Structure formats: C-alpha cells, structure tokens
Image (cartoon, grey):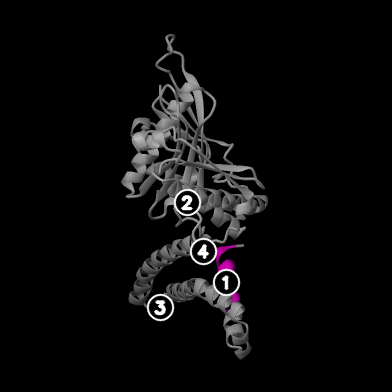
C-alpha cells in the first residue's frame, strides 16, 4: 500500500465517523460516542493534510499541462517556477504525514524504573554495572530529570551487584526504553597482569512506571511483606533500624525491595510502585509478543536477554548491534553523552513502524 492509499483509507474512516456522530442515537451510547470523538480528533489533522496534498498535486498537474501546451513563454516559465516551489512544499508535507502516521507509544511520556544487574564476569561485571549507572546518572542530569535510588546491592570490590532507581521528567521512558538488554564490556581489568582483555556483561531493564490512570489490581493477601536492615550507605539511621522493605507477590513470584528512604512506610510505598510497575510490564510484554508476531522489530525494547551493545575499551569503541551503529567516542559516551545513540535508535524504530503501516 502506498502513502496515498493509506491516506485515502483514513479519509474514508473519518467520513464514517462523521456520519456515525451525526446520528442523534449516538448520544444514548456515551462510551461509543467518547471513543468516536477521540478517534475523530486523532484523524482530523491527517485528513486536513491529505486535502492539502490533493490541492498541491492538482496545482502541479495544472502547471504541467500549461508547460506542455507551451502557448505563452512567460506563463510557461511562471508555471515551471511555481512547480519547483510546490514540489518542495509537497515533499515537506509528505515527510510530516509519514511522521504523523507512526503510532505513538502511550508509555513514552511516563517516568521509568531502571534495574541494572551485574552478569557474567564477577567483580569486573559489578564494576561495569557501576559504570552504566554513572552513565545514566549523567545523562539524566543533562536532561534535567530527577533520579531517585530505590535499592542497592554493592559489590565487595566496587560497583554494584544490583542497582534499582527511578527517573522522572519529560519523555523519560521514550528515550530510555532502548537501553533494555544485555550490555557487554571488553577491557583489561586492573588485576590483569598479562594485559589480556576480559569480557563481562550487565543486564539493564527499563520499565515504564505505572500512572494512577492505569488500574493494576493487587490483592494485599497475595503479598508477603518482610522488613530488614538496609545494607547501603545512609548513616546511623539506616544501620540501626529495620526500615528496608521486601515485597513478594506470591501469585507471580515477583520480589521487589526498597531501602533508600528513612522510614518503613516510605519504603513500602515505593516498593508498591515498583511491584505495580513490574506487573504492568508483564501485561505489556504479552501485547509486545503479539505485535512481534506481525512485526519482528530490529530495535527490540522487550527482549532483555538480547545482547544489544558492546563497549570496547582498548579500541575506544561502542557498537550497538541492533542497528549496526559504531562510534569511537567511548569515553565521551560513558560521561553521559548517549544522546546520539538514542536518537539513532529512535529513528530506526520509527522507520520500522512506518514500514509496518505501509505494508
């Protein structure tokens, strides 16, 4: 299906909605009316763009006919000049329409919870997990996002076995969701006397935080609550009270912890947010799997077992395997300058979504 055919379909659907909304009986079905109104609003701008498309195309065709007739030299030149401008306008309009056709992910505007876990590689993997956390912390600062650490399990020799934190701000999940997956590092550990390069890994999971408008049903009878003493930094208060909270959702086996707040009540509130977020993610994963049956996405945001990126220290190289992107500014990237990588991933993802619509 070409772009014009797609727009024609949208116009036909728009006309159907107008006809349905003109029926007085629709007011007796408020839910259906609300859904039609929402769809009408979503389609209106594209329908207006399609009208512009047809108008510009009609003008171009008319000018081409004048040129073919070649009866008046001055009119012919004017028609040619006008068509150059119209063709540029049409090309710009086509790109706008393509962008508007890309389905919006409703989760993109949400805050997110990020989990970083050291994988294969022992102490070196824990150090790399710390590097990733520092990279995201600096990127968050550059975006004016707020970071809140929820749970930490530190490694004996530096870095983290596990780090869970929340990012809040504008378009947080929309930018960070591409970080989900296995991140691999290749470098020479400080303890390596032979100068050999070791390969380690850390896993990143990026979960959209559940808003109040999303209803996640949790029966408190299904949750086991455990308290324990925080193992992280925090001064005397953390060390002397059992303020940390662990929630176990027995039907699914999900376990979440929060230990960074000063009170047990605050930790429990944040742990509940984490649990709801994970349960929401399970539901969304089902939807993503269904979509994947129709469209195999190269820019995967769901499969967290997939190796997505390699950080090669000896060569100063970062490679994102999903889009075959290679950059030789690793030091700069680890300082939080990952915008170029995220932009490239978003563009590729949008192109895939657009191709899926057009085919």
The residue lying at 43 percent from left, 18 percent from top is 188
The residue lying at 34 percent from left, 30 percent from top is 331
> Which of the labelled discs sits on residue 71, or is there none?
3
Q: Earlier in the sequence, mark 3 or mark 4?
A: 3
> Which of the labelled discs sits on residue 269, or is there none?
2
Mark 4, residue position = 213
Foreground of the two, 161 or 348: 161
> Which of the labelled discs sits on residue 316, or is there none?
none
The residue lying at 54 percent from left, 25 percent from top is 120
Foreground of the two, 185 or 264: 264
Q: Earlier in the sequence, mark 3 or mark 2?
A: 3
In the rendered image, residue 273, in percent from the top left (x then y), is placed at 50, 51
Residue extending farthest to the front is: 240
Circle 3 residues within 10 Å: few <14, some 14–19, many ≥20:
few
Q: Earlier in the sequence, mark 1 or mark 3?
A: 1
Mark 1, residue position = 10
- Helix, strand or loop for disc 3: loop
Q: Earlier in the sequence, mark 2 or mark 4?
A: 4
In the rendered image, residue 118, in percent from the top left (x then y), is placed at 50, 30
- Residue range (magenta): 2-15
- Helix, strand or loop for disc 4: loop
- Helix, strand or loop for disc 2: helix
Q: Are marks 1 and 3 in contact (CB under 8 Å)?
A: no
Foreground of the two, 54 or 184: 184
Q: Main secondary structure of the magenta part?
A: helix
Distance, label 2 to label 4, CA atoms, is 17 Å
Between disc 2 and disc 4, the foreground one is 2
- In this view, 256 is above or below 132: below
The residue lying at 38 percent from left, 31 percent from top is 328
């Amino acid at each position: 299906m070409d772009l014009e055919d797609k727009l024609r379909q949208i116009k036909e659907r728009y006309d159907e909605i107008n006809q349905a909304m003109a029926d007085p009986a629709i007011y007796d079905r408020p839910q259906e009316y609300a859904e039609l109104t929402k769809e009408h609003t979503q389609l209106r701008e594209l329908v207006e763009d399609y009208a512009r498309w047809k108008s510009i195309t009609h003008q171009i065709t008319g000018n081409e006919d004048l040129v073919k007739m070649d009866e008046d030299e001055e009119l012919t030149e004017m028609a040619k000049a006008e068509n150059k401008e119209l063709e540029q306008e049409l090309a710009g309009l086509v790109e706008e329409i393509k962008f508007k056709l890309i389905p919006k992910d409703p989760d993109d505007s949400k805050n997110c919870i990020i989990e970083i876990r050291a994988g294969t590689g022992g102490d070196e993997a824990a150090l790399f997990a710390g590097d990733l956390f520092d990279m995201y912390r600096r990127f968050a600062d550059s975006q004016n996002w707020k970071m809140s650490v929820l749970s930490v399990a530190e490694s004996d020799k530096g870095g983290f076995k596990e780090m869970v934190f929340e990012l809040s701000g504008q378009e947080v999940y929309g930018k960070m969701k591409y970080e989900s997956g296995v991140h691999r590092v290749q470098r020479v550990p400080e303890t390596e006397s032979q100068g050999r390069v070791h390969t380690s890994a850390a896993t990143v999971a990026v979960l959209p935080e559940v808003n109040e408008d999303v209803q996640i049903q949790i029966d408190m009878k299904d949750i086991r609550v455990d308290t324990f003493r925080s193992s992280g930094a925090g001064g005397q208060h953390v060390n002397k009270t059992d303020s940390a909270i662990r929630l176990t959702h027995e039907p699914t086996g999900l376990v979440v912890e929060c230990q960074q707040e000063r009170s047990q009540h605050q930790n429990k509130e944040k742990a509940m947010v984490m649990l709801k977020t994970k349960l929401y993610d399970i539901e969304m994963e089902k939807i993503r799997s269904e979509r994947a049956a129709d469209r195999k996405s190269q820019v995967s945001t769901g499969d967290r077992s997939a190796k997505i990126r390699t950080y090669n220290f000896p060569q100063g190289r970062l490679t994102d395997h999903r889009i075959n992107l290679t950059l030789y500014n690793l030091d700069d990237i680890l300082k939080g300058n990952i915008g170029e990588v995220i932009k490239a991933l978003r563009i590729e993802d949008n192109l895939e979504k657009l191709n899926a619509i057009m085919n």
